[in-house]
Image (tube, helix red, strand yellow):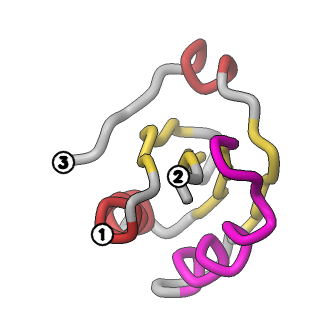
Amino acid sequence: MTTMLNETEASALSAAKVVDARGAACPGPLLEAKKAMGSVPVGEVLELWSSDSQTKNDVAAWAGKVGHGFLGSAPAQGYERVFIRRAK
């Protein structure tokens, strides 16, 4: 199960990096997030934009497996904003 954030909660998160993977099909958005995570400082947030409806589930599973914090996702116009906190 993934966490849905409302607009206020999503706006309160300050992302160190935003990755725009809109238009990419699975597993593209997840691969983009993995690649970008190395440039995000430990403790900071990566925001991933994806139009693939499976991305939030894939990212939540990956984050849990590797130890990052999945903060949730928020709907936007035609895509989802997915938030991950770098843990290591």
The picture places residue 17, in percent across and down from the top left corner, at 81, 52
Amino acid at pointer 1: Lys
Q: Which of 19 and 84 is in front in this view?
A: 84
The residue that mark 1 highlights is 65
Label 2: few (<14), some (14–19) or many (≥20) C-alpha neighbours in 10 Å:
some
The residue under label 2 is 87
* Residue in the image at 44% along x and 66% along y: 55
Q: Nearer the viewer, mark 1 or mark 3?
A: 1
Q: Earlier in the sequence, mark 1 or mark 2?
A: 1
The disc placed on residue 1 is: 3
In the displayed structure image, the side of residue 17 where residue 74 appears, left or right: left
Q: Is disc 1 placed on a helix, strand or loop?
A: helix
Judging depth in this view, the residue of 77 and 72 nearest the camera is 72
Report how many numbered discs are placed on residues in the image: 3
Compared to residue 2, the image places residue 67 above or below, namely below
Q: How many angstroms separate mark 1 from mark 3 (CA)?
A: 15 Å
**Secondary structure state at the residue bearing disc 2:** loop
Verify whether residue 39 appears in magenta.
yes
What's the amino acid at mark 2? Ala
Segment tinted magenta in the rendering = 28-44
- Whichever of callouts 1 and 3 sits on the residue coming sooner in the sequence is 3
Q: How crowded is mark 3: few (under 14 residues within 10 Å), some or many (20 or more)?
A: few
Tell me the CA gap for discs 2 and 3.
20 Å
- Queried whether the magenta region covers residue 54, the answer comes back as no
